[in-house]
Amino acid sequence: QVQLVESGGGLVQAGGSLRLSCGTSGNIFSIYNMGWYRQAPGKQREFVAGVTSGTTTHYADSVKGRFTISRDNAKKTVYLQMSSLKPEDTAVYYCNARPPLTNWRSDIGSWGQGTQVTVSS
């Protein structure tokens, strides 16, 4: 199990920006695929963005062009830069670490405790 701790959530107005961070423990961060997911009230958790160990990125259609995922293996940290935020981006955002070659939509790997992002209109 990989321990994950998210930070950077908060309240922002529509059109604003936030950067989420997810720090990890352990010595094998660099081989994991890292992802960000979110869960809005009354909805299922959904994939937002992912970055492979080889730094290939993947995004949900709803956030393409607005969100950017990146990783710093030396700091064992993955980031989610969110721009042009919309009220529909309001959710609890979760960090996930998963083995390589796994489907981003599968519920596997280790999860953080989540950080709340609220976008006001």
Image (spheres, helix red, strand yellow):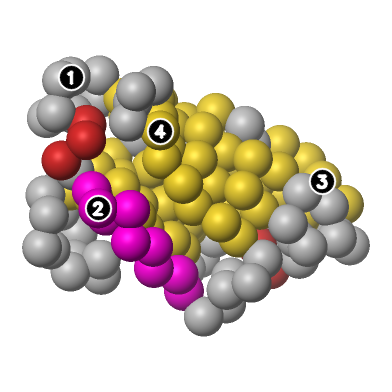
* Label 3 vs label 2, nearer the camera: 2
Which quarter of the rendering shows the C terminus?
A: bottom right
Could you tell me if residue 93 is visible in this image?
Answer: no
Q: Amino acid at mark 2?
A: Gly
**Which label's residue is closer to the chain start, 2 or 1?**
1
Q: Is residue 9 above or below residue 60?
A: above
In this picture, which residue range is highlighted in magenta?
Answer: 52-60
> Residue 66: which quarter of the image?
bottom right
Give the residue pinned by disc 3.
12
Q: Decide whether residue 56 is among the magenta residues.
A: yes
Tell me which residue sits at (24%, 43%) in the image. 97
Q: Quadrant of the N terminus?
A: top left
User: Spatial distance from mark 2 to mark 1, Cα to Cα?
Assistant: 19 Å
Marks 4/1: CA distance?
Answer: 14 Å
Where's residue 48, x and y in %? 46, 63
Q: Nearer the viewer, mark 4 or mark 1?
A: 4
Q: Residues within 10 Å of mark 3 (few under 14, many from 20)?
A: some
Residue nearest the viewer, comparing 55 with 80:
55
- The residue indicated by pointer 2 is 54
Q: Which residue lies at the image location 57% right of the left edge and 38% below the top edge?
A: 20
In the figure, 41 relative to 92: above or below? below
